[in-house]
Amino acid sequence: MTVLHETIRVDRPAREVFAYVANFSTCEQWDSTAIEATRLNDGPLGVGSRFKVVCSAPVGTLSLDYEIVDYVPDVKVVLLGRSRFFTVQDTITITPTVTGCELVYTAEFTWRPLIAPFAERFQDGLERMGRASVQQGLKRALDDDFPAPEISRSNARADHFVPTALTRFTKRGYRLSKRHWNPVSAYVGDKHVVVTGATAGLGKVCSEDLARFGAELTLVVRNRMRGQELVRELKASTGNKRINLEIADLSLMADVDKVIASLNKRGTAIDALINNAGALFNPRAVTSEGLEQSFALLLLSPYRLTEGLYPLLKKTERGARIINVVSGGMYTQKLRVDDLQNEKGQYSGSVAYARAKRALMVKSEQWAEDWANDGIVVNAMHPGWADTPGVESSLPAFHRLTRFFLRTPAEGADTITWLAVATEAGKVTGKIFLDREPRTTHLVDSTRESEQDREALREILDNWDKEQSSAA
């Protein structure tokens, strides 16, 4: 048997440290040899939870199947891993200290009979691996002291030339960026997140991730049956029972106002608001309230919802976050304050979508400036080219042309979750992100709006109810 033993001290509560390390799929972020780690079964984390970890090895890769065999919340977790060369029992114990906690990590390797005679040769390498994984990797992850995110040199260069910028929208762009990501160990078990458009695509993926992390969720969905089914699925797959549902067609301002009233009545502070709901409409149509659908759903709705939930966002003591999901399509359009409802010229659903997202980006920057002193961080993100049901149904020609380059929904949604969770994401406001990096808001100068148009957008939205009342 070969035994490794490492100890670290962390200035964080035991429950936060335990929540991170007990979910062994996080080892990909800190283990010096782990290439990929995934959880294999659903349900609450505990005895019987299984994980697959793929590690780099001197020759090729090595796959290990892990299972939790002992689980004492906030105190100890024991995992048994099996591979073709050895079994390993990893024991992680956590003891509170005056300033945080002490973590002791022990790994006991039992070698297969054909490998056992050579075990001593592996001792030095395993000890180096253990130190690198625990003393450096895990300690760095749990210290969670990363600087405010900045754009990398390669992505900054790419953004200066449209064709190279577009390559970063693909799944290859995601994988290139992922190589440089920091671990995310932030604790969200005491946070409340509101997600709109949660039943499909990006919204569903980030809702699943946040539920798995233990956040309290309020999901705003249009279809009651699909919403209820999603809540059942999330509770069963994650063990998280703190999942609430609000039913609303967010293209109708009356429904938006009902959600605002319901959440304000409940009074639970909101730590993160994710404005994700969206759709691309062809041909042009108006809602029962007389508003063009794209304008109503993609711009006026998130504006009204965010403004209405401001008291609950300001209420949280930890600093709230607003994440507005925009689109790479906005790079093709300029802010059109003279035609927010797409009444002029020939209507195009994709153009209307892109214009609304451009306006939402401008509004994100304005909120970031207006609410900086309230501790509210406001950022936008775009998912790149992701293979979601909405893209396939709304843009079939684009989907056929790019399907081999499209990201998975999980890859597209990753930055949404990261903006809501990661500690360093709260250190910057008023930016647009792609793959966890702030990016340019304009790829070409022709799409830049004037300061007059920016202020006109603010005035139009701020005075919308007054103008509608006077028009009536």
Image: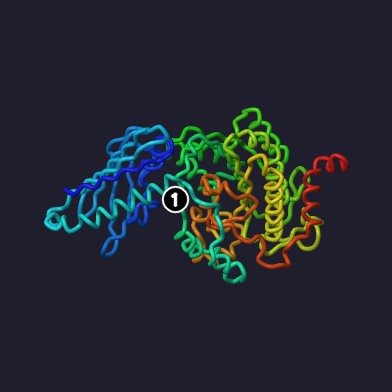
- What is the total number of numbered labels drawn onto the structure image? 1
Where, quadrant-wise, is the C terminus in this rendering? Answer: top right
Residue for point 46% across, 48% down: 184
Foreground of the two, 121 or 97? 97
Image coloring type: rainbow
Foreground of the two, 192 or 124? 124
Q: Residue 371: x percent and y percent?
A: 69, 43
Q: Residue 96: x percent and y percent?
A: 37, 33
Q: Residue 75: x percent and y percent?
A: 34, 33
Q: Quadrant of residue 60?
A: bottom left
Foreground of the two, 71 or 374? 374
Q: Residues within 10 Å of mark 1 (few under 14, many from 20)?
A: some
Left or right: 93 in relation to 296? left
Regarding residue 250, the answer to whether it shows in the image is: yes
Q: Residue 160: x percent and y percent?
A: 62, 69
Regarding residue 38, the answer to whether it shows in the image is: no
Q: Quadrant of residue 68?
A: top left
Left or right: 1 in relation to 320? left
Which residue matches tag 1? 183
Residue for point 57% across, 69% down: 157
Picture layout, residue 50 above or below residue 434: above
Residue for point 54% across, 58% down: 386
Q: Amino acid at mark 1?
A: Pro
Residue for point 66% across, 39% down: 374
Left or right: 83 in relation to 350? left
Foreground of the two, 83 or 400? 83
Left or right: 433 in relation to 39? right
Element at badge 1?
loop
